[in-house]
Image (cartoon, rainbow, N blue to C red):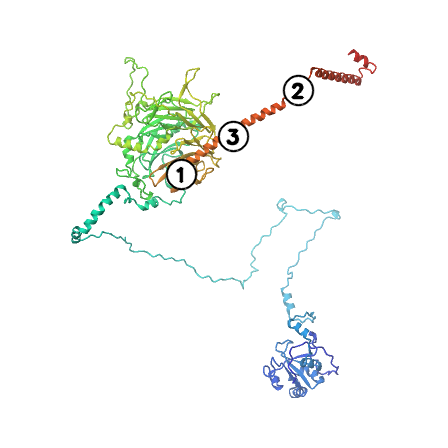
Amino acid sequence: MAPKPQRRKTLKRSKAKPALPVREEEEPINMESVGHPEIYPLVLTTMTQEIFNCRIDEDVTDEQPYKLIKKEDIFADFESRAAVSDFYPVKKLVQEYPGEELLLIYDKDFKYGLNFYLIGTEEGKENYLNPPEVPEEQEDYKEYISEDIYIYKPPVSKPWVSLGSEKEIEEESVKESTKQITHVISRKRSGFGAPVKFSDRKAPSVRDAHIECTAYPDKNFTLKQLERDVGLQAVPQIRDTSTQTRWAYPKNATTQYYPREFSEEEKETLGQSKTLTEFLNNVSISVEIALQQNEIMNTFIDDWKSLAEEEGTFGDKTDTHLREYQSFTDLHNLTEKMITCVCWHPVIYGLIAVSVAVRLSFEERVHFSGKLLLQPSLILFWSFSDPIQPQLMLESPDDIFCFKFCPSDPNIIAGGCVNGQIVMWDITAHADQIENIKAGGKRSKKVTLKPMFLLEPESNKEAMYVRQCAVSSIENGHRKVITDIHWLPDTFEINRLGSVFENRSGISCQLVTCSADCTICFWDIRPQKALTPQPPTEKKKEERIEIPFDIPSTFLHLDLSWKPLSKIRLSKGETTLDHCPTKLSLGEDNLLYKAQDKILAQSRAVKAGEMNPYQNLEGGLASHLKPIDDFCTKFFVGTEEGEVIYTDWKMERDPETGRLMAKKPVSLYSVHDGAVHTVQRSPFYEDIILTVGGWNVAIWKEGVMAGPLLQSSCAPKRYTSGHWSLTRPGVFYIGREDGYIDIWDLLEKTHEPAQSQNICITTITCIKPWTFSAKQQFIAIADYYGTLHILEIPWTLSHPSSNEASSISHYFEREVRHLEYVEQRKKIREQEKKEMDLELEKKKIKTYQKSKERLESEVKMDYDNYLELEKNTLISLGLIKLKETISYVEMM
C-alpha cells in the first residue's frame, strides 16, 4: 500500500492516451469544469462499500481516505449487478483505464459533490500517492498561506431550464382590462391650418363647462374580505396598589420624674452627723464670698442660649425671603380704592391702621364729585385676630392721603385730606374695646399671634364708626392734597416766626404738613388767645350747637376754625414759581422710633385715673416761653420734580416789604428723575437720610453739601416707596410699581439690591416694618388694589451682626471722605483750566512794535499797488488808450 500523503495537492493535468470510444456507453462525467479532468465523482451505497471493503470510518478514514480497487473486481460487479452497479456511470473509464488498480478516494467534505471520486489517470494516481517534494524555503512560505484561499473563477453560462416561474410573472403582471376612450376633436373646414391656442380656465366661470361624477356605492361590485392582517401584542394588566399602616390606638407617652429623698431616719442621722456639720461650716464662708463676688458663675444662666439663640419663628437663619403671614382686604369698603398710608398702632400689638382713597385722577374726581360724596372716606383698623372685618373705622370728610398717631397719646390721630384739610380723631372711648380684642380683657402677644386656622372672627359683630373731632378751616389751610404730615416731639415747640422754645404743655401739640400747593404749614392744636379782647357789649350772640354724644369734645375749639401757625413757601429764587414739596423729614424724627416705651407709660397713667392732658390743652399756655439755644431748625424736603432741598423753617423779614418770608434753601440737588416718595431719617444715625423717587435711591448725610453719599443707578421699574429697617442699620426696603420689593443690604452690596421679591401684581404704595418682639418682626406692604400684605421678616434681615452699626458708620465716613476728595480734585482741575486759558490768550495776543517810517512805507506801497491795478483795469476795458497812460497817471 502506498504511504500516506502529507498534504492534498492540486493534481496536475495529464494527457491520457486517446482510446476508442464505446458508443453504446455514456460518457462519464468528470471535474473538467473546475480544472480537474482526472477526477470522476461517484456515489457508493453501503452495499457497494461492503463489497469493495471501502466502508466509511472503518476502511476509509480521515487518516487514510483512499482505497485501491482492482479492475477485475469492478468487472465482476458489472456482471453480477449490471446497470445497478454504482460503478456503471464510469464503466467506460474502467474499461479504458491502462492500469490494473484504480484509486478510489473518500470525499468527506463533498468537495466535488458526492461521497467518493475516482482518479481516472495513472499520472494523477501517482501524484496523489507520491506527491513531489517542495523546497524548504517554499515550504516555510506556504505555512503562512491559508489553505482555503479563494481563487476567482469566471462563471460558466448554462442553458436556461424552465421551472414554471414565467407563469407566475405573467399572472402578476398588470394588464389593462378596460377599453380606452378615444376622443375626436374636429373643427370647421374654414379653420383648417389656423393656429390653435390652448389655455386654462376655471370651470365655474363658464356655464356647463364641466360635469361632476361623484362616487357612489355600486351593489353589483362587492368585495368580500377573506383575509386580514392584524397585529396583536400581549400586555400584562397593571394595577397600582398602596398600603398604609395605621396606628389604631395612639397614646401619649409621658414620663414623670421625682426627686429621691432621704427617709426620716436618714435625715435624723445626717442632721446629727458631726462630719457634715464641720464640712458645711468650713465651706459656707468661701461659697458665700464667691457668690457675692460672682467669681464662680451665675447659676441662673442658660448655657444653651449662650451658644445660639432659640428659634422662635418659622424657617431658619439661612432663609432670606419674606414670608406671607396674613393679608387684609375689605370687600365692602375698598371697592376700586387704593391704600395711601399705613401706620402700626404704637401700643397695641397686632393692630394696624390703613387709609384708603379712590383710584381717580384730579380731573376724574371733579367729574365724579357728586358720586364720591355718597361714598365714605375711612381709615380702617385691622387686627391679626380678625382678618375679615375691621375693628374700627374712622370717618373723614374726604379721602385721607396721610395720617399719624400722636407720639404722646396713641388715641389721638391726625390726618391730611385730599382737599387740603387736616382731620383730628380721638378714639379714647374705644381704646379698651380694640385693645381687648380676642384677649379676654388682657393684652397678650400670644393671643394675637395665633395661626389663622385657630382664629374665629366675630361675624356678627358690627363695625364701629368713629366720627372726626375737628377739621381745619378750608379758607386758611392748604389748597391741594396734603402729601405728608408729622407730629413735632414733646421736647420743643415753635412760634409763628419759627423760633424754638421749650414745650410748655409737656405733650406733642404741634403738627407740620406739606401739600401740593407749594406750602409747608405748622399747626398748633391748643386754643389760640384773642389778640384784641372784645368788650362784652360788642360780643355777638353765638348760637350754641349741640354736640352729638358720639363725638368727643377734645378738639371742639378747632373745628372749622383751625388756622396754621405759620406757612412757608419754598421759592425758586429769581422766578415767581415755588417748589412743590411731597415729603419732609425733621431733625427729631428719629426720636419717635424710640418713644414706644414712653407712649406705653403715658397710656397706662391715663388708665390709672390721671387726667388726660389733651382734655386740658390750655393748662400750659400761661407759662413763659423759654428759648432753646443751638437748636437745628433745618430739615430735608423732597419735591415733585425730584429735587432734594435742605432748608430752614425760620422766617425772616423782607428788607423791602417788611413781610415774613422763608429763607433761601441751604442746598438743592436734582438727583431723582421723578417725584420723591420717601424722605426718612435712619433710626440708628440722626444725620443719615434716605430719599426714594423716580427710578433711583439716594442716601444723604446732614451737613455734607457735596452731594449724596450713595446714589443708585436707574432701576428697571419706577420706585414708589421705601423704609429703613428698624433693627439693622444697613438694610432698607424699596417698593416698585411692578409689585416687587428690593431689599438693600449695604454690608453685602452697595451698587444694587441684595435681593428682589415679588409681593403683588400691582404698584406698592406704602411700606411699614414693625418689631413685634425680639424674635419676630413684620413688614406691612400696601398695594394699589387695596390689599394689605403682612409679611414676616426672616432672621437674616431682622438680627444685626455684632459690629454692623460700626461697619455701616465707617462706610458712611469713607463716602464722606471720598466726596471731599472729589471736591478738591474739582477745584484743582478748575484752577488748572484757568491757567491754561490764560496762557493761550497770551500766545494769541502778541503785539509787534513797528516804527513810524516802516508803517508809512507799507501804506505807500499798498497805494502804489492799487494805482497799478486801476490802470490795468481801465486799459482792459478800453476806457483809456496806451498813449494816454502817462498823462492819466500824471493827472492822478
Residue 825 tag number? 3
Q: Quadrant of residue 167?
A: bottom right
Q: Is residue 756 left or right of residue 868?
A: left
Earlier in the chain: of badge 1 and badge 3, it is 1
> Compared to 14, does 321 lie above or below?
above
The reply to whether residue 742 is visible in this rendering is no
Q: Position of residue 463 (x, y in %)?
A: 31, 34
Q: CA distance from mark 3 to mark 2?
A: 39 Å
Along the viewing direction, whichever of 615 and 203 lies nearer the viewer: 615
Q: Amino acid at mark 3?
A: Arg
Q: Is residue 188 left or right of residue 724?
A: right
Q: Nearer the viewer, mark 1 or mark 2?
A: 2
Q: CA distance from mark 1 to mark 2?
A: 71 Å
- Quarter of the image containing the C terminus? top right
Q: Nearer the viewer, mark 1 or mark 3?
A: 3
Q: CA distance from mark 1 to mark 3?
A: 32 Å
Along the viewing direction, whichever of 570 and 240 lies nearer the viewer: 570
Secondary structure, mark 2, is: loop
Secondary structure, mark 1, is: helix
> Compared to 859, does 308 lie above or below?
below
Q: Amino acid at mark 1?
A: Glu
- Quarter of the image containing the N terminus? bottom right
Q: Position of residue 826 (x, y in %)?
A: 52, 29
Residue 848 tag number? 2
Q: Are marks 3 and 2 in contact (CB under 8 Å)?
A: no
Q: Are marks 1 and 3 in contact (CB under 8 Å)?
A: no
Provide the residue designation for mark 1.
804
Residue drawn at (54%, 27%), measured in percent from left and top? Answer: 830
